[in-house]
Image: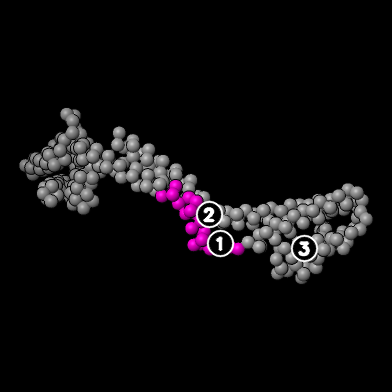
Amino acid sequence: MKKALGLILLTLGIAITAGTGSQLAPEFKAELTRNGDAQLRKARSERRQKAYCRARKSAELKLAEGCSSKSKTTHLVRPERLSGVTETKRTGRMLMALERRNRRLPAVVAEKRARWVKALKKERSAHKRAEAQATQGPGARLSGWAAQSGFGFGLGLLLVFAGAWICRRAISEELVAEGPSGEDGPVDFGALLGDVCDRVAALHQEMVALEAPTTDDLDALKAKLEDIQKGDLARLCESGPKVQQRHGMAGFAQIFSPLSAGERKLNRLWSTLVDRHWPEALASAADAVANLRAAQTAVAQTAAE
């Protein structure tokens, strides 16, 4: 129940912080809106100009007023007069040039030209609004955002922390309450480790007692080893997160460092039994016992702290 409550609070907190954190400060949002409007109107003016040029071409009029072809380019205003000027001045000079060249044109072409002029006027007004506004600094932008969305963001952040804390506590309680499970229910980690140590030590003593092991002896030893590896040893290794929750990262490292070394030596023992390398098998078994005993000692020390 605790974990479910924590997940609900965590999900709700993430949703609130994402929604409020993505909002823009009111003034900055208005600034972006005006800039975006100016760019959209500029794109519309360019489309209207292209439509006007196509109409001139269809009416078989000569190229003029910025219309161009593959072989010839015309300019409404000399390029040097448009270089380095603001968008407001650029559109203003283009409008002045169009007004001076008010010539008689076919109806369709005149209509396209009028629409272009109208679009240019709206574009110039949009650029005026964008250029007249003051750019908002980071501090003012943050203050504006905080005034609008700060409370919601803070509430969402609080829910995230609360949900994460509740989930962590619930998981910790579950892991601490549970030990490595067996057929008859949960088993204490230290008791299970002691049983594995005793079985591996007994296996080592059985190996030492064999002066000239046969193939059948090696196969029998391998079967006993596999029973340990696939059973209690596997359950010990799977309980790592529970040990970490109970004893912390330092205690976990102190216990699982020798335990992992012992597991590797048992894997090495299995390989040497398969390869019929008896001296190396004896050495691996002895090392595995030593490492597992060290893990036992670490469990006792950690429990006493």
Real-space Cα distance between discs 1 and 3? 27 Å
Dot 1 or dot 2, earlier in sequence = 2
Position of residue 160 in the picture relative to residue 45 (left or right): left
Residue 136: numbered disc:
1
Above or below for 153 versus 143: above
Query: Which residue is rendered at x = 44% and y = 47% of the image?
Result: 152
Q: Secondary structure at mark 2?
A: loop
State the image coordinates of residue 173 (x, y, percent, origin top left): 23, 39
Q: Where in the figure is residue 221, as x and y percent of width and height?
A: 15, 38
Q: Which residues are magenta?
A: 134-154
Q: Are marks 2 and 3 in contact (CB under 8 Å)?
A: no
Q: Foreground: 18 or 237?
A: 18
Report x, y in % for residue 279: 14, 48
Tell which tag, 2 or 3, sits nearer the viewer: 2
The foreground one among 294 and 21 is 21
The reply to whether the C-beta atoms of the residues labelled 1 and 2 are less than 8 Å apart is yes
Please tell me in which quadrant of the rendered image residue 45 appears: bottom right
Disc 1 residue crowd, few under 14, some 14–19, many 20+, Cα 10 Å: some
Identify the element where label 1 is drawn.
loop
In the rendered image, residue 136 lying in the magenta stretch gets the answer yes
**Which residue is found at the position 63% from the left and 61% from the top?**
133
> Circle 2 sits on which residue?
25
Which numbered tag is attached to residue 92?
3
State the separation of the CA atoms marked 1 and 2: 10 Å
